[in-house]
Image: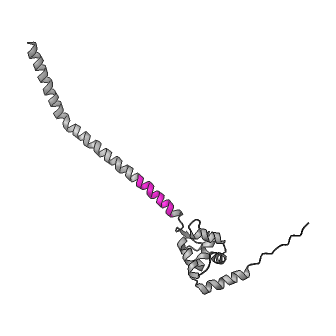
Amino acid sequence: MPNLAVALKDEIRRLARKEVKSMTGATTQSVARFRREIASLKREINAAHKKLVFLEGQERKRISSPNAAVTSGDGNDVRFSARSVKAQRRRTGLSAADYAKLVGVTPLTIYNWENGKSRPRLAQLETLVALRGIGKREALAKLAIVKNSETPKRKTKRTPK
């Protein structure tokens, strides 16, 4: 008899496991599917976050770039472009030193503007805008006026003591 009782318990256990497995199988599959979907959504969120960080950096660079727009006092938007400064200077046929005298800055400032290392102040930007439409002759005439109006530096003699 003990063998019959053991066999009966084993059979009941087997059938119970089979029944539980069939009832929870659908739930287990749903849980696995939901976990895969959650993992996929997390990957999408991470990718979107990385893209957002990248685009914010690009926007910060764009805003602080030498090509950003500046609003002048009269409400007109004026754009500064390093390439434009270089092109203007070459179009007029002036050296960086002569162009700097025309604008009223140092030659190093012109170099920095042309290479995008710095940006002109609003007053300097307005001077650059005023020089945009002039040709070679007009630039040379203005340069001559600027050179004539400059006061020559005095050389001081040192007297030996």
Q: Residue at x 26, y 39 (%)?
A: 31
> 44 or 85, which is in the foreground?
85
Q: Position of residue 72 (x, y in %)?
A: 58, 72
| Residue 115 location, quadrant | bottom right
Q: Is residue 18 above or below residue 103?
A: above
* Residue farthest front in this picture: 160
Q: Is-magenta flag for residue 56?
A: yes
- Furthest-top residue in view? 1
From this view, report whether residue 127 is shown above or below residue 22: below
- In which image quadrant can residue 123 be found? bottom right
Quarter of the image that includes the C terminus = bottom right
Q: Main secondary structure of the magenta part?
A: helix
Q: Is residue 79 visible to the viewer in this orientation of the structure?
A: no
Q: Whole-percent x and y of residue 126? A: 60, 75
Figure check: 82 above or below 3: below
* Residue shown at the point (18%, 32%) measured from the top left: 21
Q: What are the residue bounds of the magenta stretch?
A: 50-62
In the image, taking residue 60 as reference, residue 100 lies left or right, namely right
Q: Residue furthest right?
A: 161
14 or 91, nearer to the observer: 91
Is residue 10 positioned above or below 78 on the image? above
- Looking at the picture, how far across and down is residue 2, in whole percent? 10, 13
* Residue 5 visible in this rendered orientation of the protein: yes
Residue 138 is a magenta residue: no
Quadrant the N terminus occupies: top left
Question: For the view shown, which residue lies furthest in the bottom direction?
Answer: 137
